[in-house]
Image (cartoon, rainbow, N blue to C red):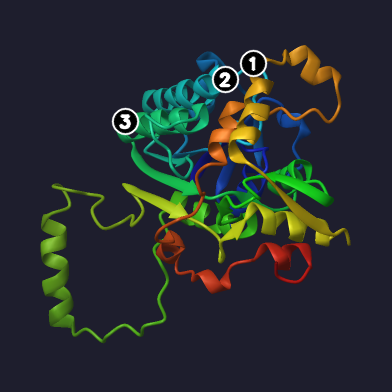
Amino acid sequence: MRILVVGGTGFIGEKLCRELDGRGHEVTALARNPKEADLPKGIETVMGDVTAYESIEAAFEGQDAVVNLVALSPLFRPSGGNEMHFRVHRDGTDHVVRAAEDHGVEKIVQMSALGADPDGNTAYIKSKGLAEGIVRESSLDWVVFRPSVVFGDGGEFISYTKQLATPYLTPLPGGGKTRFQPIWVGDLVPMLADATVGKAQETDDEPEETSEAELDEELTPAIRTVGDDEDEGTDPHVGEVYEVGGPEVLTLAEVATLAHGADDKPVDIVSIPMPLAGLGLKSLDYVPESVLDAIPGLPRMGSDQFRSLKFDNTVADNDVTAFGVSEDELMTVAEYLGVGAA
């Protein structure tokens, strides 16, 4: 299978490219700076920017499926302001879908986000919701993933938490009660790969023996209906929206305690009233980017980041089970960091 991974040199993308390559697929990683990638020699790399259609369009020729992982972080105010979320997520997805349709690509796997909603209360959530709409309305077979925060080597969630919540005396908005359900990138990537290639959930059940006559009866109607719906029943993931999270729900304060605990540093949480925290973070909206760039350590945050701290990032029903995985098999943050549970 020929697979194009858009954003193939990023935190998740590089690991997905390796996973798909290891499964024997022909993989192409598309990125703005592909030369920076550390990928096996068998993986082709091409340069392109999803905000510029002409720069990515040719890479879609001859591909069977595309995985769109390009995203800006919701944790920080993007360079260029919140409008960049719409340029990258909404417009970038539109370009990916258009290129896929123009070149006969059959399937797209779209990385979205929990809470994605065109009417959401942050630019990130709105733009992700609009991007989902573009994918669903396309002529492609589609699969959408909505993960909680993803952690692992090369990820930003742990480092972001350590930056927001300093060790020792640790002031946090609302006492750090915002809840997350972090999923390890090493657990997420095989699920993305399964969804891309159409691998069904594995089962340990022994198949029942079928007589030759029964087999003939089962095959005959299937042969007759191929022309009506050729793909029916062949890919269990098409048309699905998967909300996935890790094995536990942790508050921001608990993640901070684990993150600093890995460095043998204590954490003493001091609660900042949410209205006061909101004033502080919203005021950063008015700090020019030149100032943010010039002062190391000044957080690239703002009102959107404050709003995101007001709602939990957890799943109601964990769809990891669709991939034959149970929550208790997944990596916890404590296990990853090599520390005791919070």
Identify the secondary structure beneath mark 1: loop
Which residue bears the numbered disc 1?
80
Left or right of 122 on screen, residue 302:
right
Left or right of 224 on screen, residue 291:
right
Disc 1 marks a residue whose amino acid type is Gly
Could you classify mark 3 by the number of other residues whose Cα lies within 10 Å: few (under 14), some (14-19), or many (20 or more)?
A: some
Q: Earlier in the sequence, mark 2 or mark 3?
A: 2
Residue 103 placement (x, y as % from top left): 41, 26
Q: How many marks?
A: 3
Residue 213 placement (x, y as % from top left): 13, 81
How far is the residue under mark 3 from the one under mark 1?
29 Å
**Tag nearer the camera, 2 or 3:** 2
Residue 317 shows in this picture: yes
Residue at 45 percent of width and 69 percent of height: 324
Tag 2 near tag 1, CB within 8 Å: yes
Classify residue 275 by image quadrant: top right
Frontmost residue, 13 versus 17: 13
Residue 70 placement (x, y as % from top left): 57, 33
Which residue bears the numbered disc 2?
84
Which residue bears the numbered disc 3?
138
Residue at 13 percent of width and 47 percent of height: 228
Disc 2 marks a residue whose amino acid type is Met
Identify the secondary structure beneath mark 3: loop
